[in-house]
Each structure stands twice: as C-alpha cells, then as structure tokens.
Image (cartoon, rainbow, N blue to C red):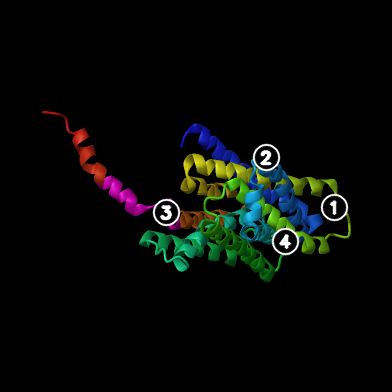
Amino acid sequence: MQRAHAVEFTVLAAVWGAAFLFMRVALVEFGPLPTALVRVTVAALVLLPLLLWRGFGMLVRERWMKIFAVGVLNSGMPSLLFAYALQSITTGLTAVLNATVPLFGALLAWTLLGDRPSRSRMAGLAIGFTGVALLAGGKAGLRPDVAPAQALLAVLACLGAALSYALAAAMAKRWLVGVPPLAVASGSLLGASIVFAVPGLLAWPTIAPSAKAWAAVAMAGSFCTAGTTLMYFRLIERIGPARSLAVTFVLPIFAAAYGMLFLGEPLTVWTVLCGAVVVCGTALAVGLLDPAAAASRRAALGPAASAARTPPE
C-alpha cells in the first residue's frame, strides 16, 4: 500500500470511528430512533447535491425500490441498532462488534450463495464468533448500572446491525451491479431517511435537544456517514475491496480511544483480548489472512531463495 493510500486509510478509520462517539453524545437527548433519523437525513442532504450534479437522479428514480431497500438495511437499521446499543455498552465494544460485518458476509456467502469456505476460513468463522461469545458473556465494556439482560440485548443489537450491513452488501451485489457508487450511497441514504421519517418523528423527544446534541448528530451524519461513504468507495477503487475492508478492523482502535478521552470510558484487558480474537477470526474468514496461500508462497520461493544464497562456483 502506497503512503498516500495508507494515510487515506487511516483517516477513514479515524473519522468512521468517531461516529460512535457522536452518536453516544446525541442519543442522550434525542433517543435512538430520532438519532438514526437525523443521522441518515443529514447524510442524504450532503450527498444529494452531488448526486444531481453528476446526473444520477434518473438512475435512482428508475431503481428506487431496490436502492431504498438496500438503504434501510445498510444505513437505517445499523444507525438505529448501534444507537440503541450505545445506551448500555461502550463505544469501543460497539466498534469491535461492528468489525464482525465481514464475518457475517462470509457466513451469508456460505449459507445463501453456496460459496463453501476453505478450512482456514471455516476456522476463522469459529474463532470470530467465539470472540463475540466471550465478549457477550463478560462484563467488560458495559456501562455502569446496566443489567446483564440489557447488556445482552445491546450486544445482539450490534450483531443485528452487522448482519444488516452484510445483507445489504449481498443485495447490492445482486441488484445494483453497474450502478455508480454515488448513486447507491446517496439513494440508499435518502430511502432510509424517508422510511424512518414517521417513526422517528413519533419518537421525537418532548424536550428540545441542545445545540451540543444537534452538532453531534450533524457530525455523525455529514463527516462520519456521507464523508466516509465517499472515502470508502474511493479507497475501494484505488486499493481494492479486500484491503479496504480491513478498515473495519482498525476503526475500533479509534473508537475506543475517543471513548476514553472524551467520555471517560474504561478499556479493559478482556475487551482488548476478545476484540483481537474477533478481528483475527474475521480476517481469516474473509481471506485477508490465508495460511495455506502463505505456505504455498514460501514453498515457491524456497528454491529461488536457496539458489540466491548459494554462491556461484
């Protein structure tokens, strides 16, 4: 990876990881459903001018049902479920559970598409979900005075959000091949904001949120949703999807750091260890770590390396 790409990758992880911080600040006054509504609406309003400028409006109109369906799963539901979870668990733990998105993607490819994984990928699935079970069974990453049942619901909400992301990716791959990423991103955010409009307004807080809460949710929608969407697709174009996918493994570091610095959240050794298990298992499951391929490369390089070390006679 070139230095410029590495910098862009790191910036993406840093900005994306901040979404959990801003959502945590906003939901205290907005509540989970209005927070999700405002976040996706702000993101849609940021991207819509770009959509119209590029002339993709008609394309979204022609495929609006499929794009809106992808939007609800890719933007609406994860925003709602993560906001709900952040009431009970820390931003760091939430971000670690967000890193299971590729894990669910690999599981869906296996169960729905018949893409049988290799032994190393199957081991990765087992390792990844073991890490999740260890996180769910422990008390690390919980907020004070949170009942175990409530904490379990928060973990399940995060896993539901990860599954929703994976389902949206599978649907987009089947329905929206060839549609420009900007059209998919902006159209899906618009669809999520429309679908969430009525329930979000019905759940609107009776006490007007403060300027701080508005600023937090606006940052989550503009920079951490609209901005990262554009950055992510740009990175995919430059370094490929496999390397870009690894950003989900890096953003928990930033999310945990933001939580400690700005919210005073603790970071326990147990959370770090279990998070490492989840990340390693996910990397195996999606093929970012492939022991068999590495062994084949070493075997292929072995004779050449031996010849290089042997001095000529």
Of the numbered discs in the image, which one, if any, rests on residue 209?
Answer: 1
Outermost residue to the top: 313
**Which marked residue is nearer to the observer: mark 2 or mark 3?**
2
Front: mark 3 or 4:
4
* Kind of residue at badge 4: Val
In whole angstroms, how far apart are the C-alphas of marks 3 and 4? 35 Å
Look at mark 4 in the image and give the residue it sits on: 195
- Badge 3 vs badge 4, beta-carbon distance below 8 Å: no
At horizontal 58% and vertical 47% (from top left) the residue drawn is 181
Residue 197 found in image quarter: bottom right
Mark 4 vs mark 2, foreground winner is 2
Q: Is residue 107 left or right of residue 163?
A: left
Is 9 positioned to the left or the right of 92 in the image?
left
Residue kind at label 3, given as amino acid type? Gly
Percent of width and height locating residue 81: 67, 61
Type of amino acid at the residue the image marks with label 2? Trp
Asked if residue 256 shows in the view, the reply is no
Q: Which residue is more in the foreground, 198 or 37?
A: 198
Mark carried by residue 287: 3
- Which SS type dominates the magenta stretch? helix
The span shown in magenta is 284-299
Give the residue number, with chain letter if any, for mark 2.
Answer: 53
Of the image marks 2 and 1, the number of the one nearer the N terminus: 2
Classify mark 4: helix, strand or loop: helix
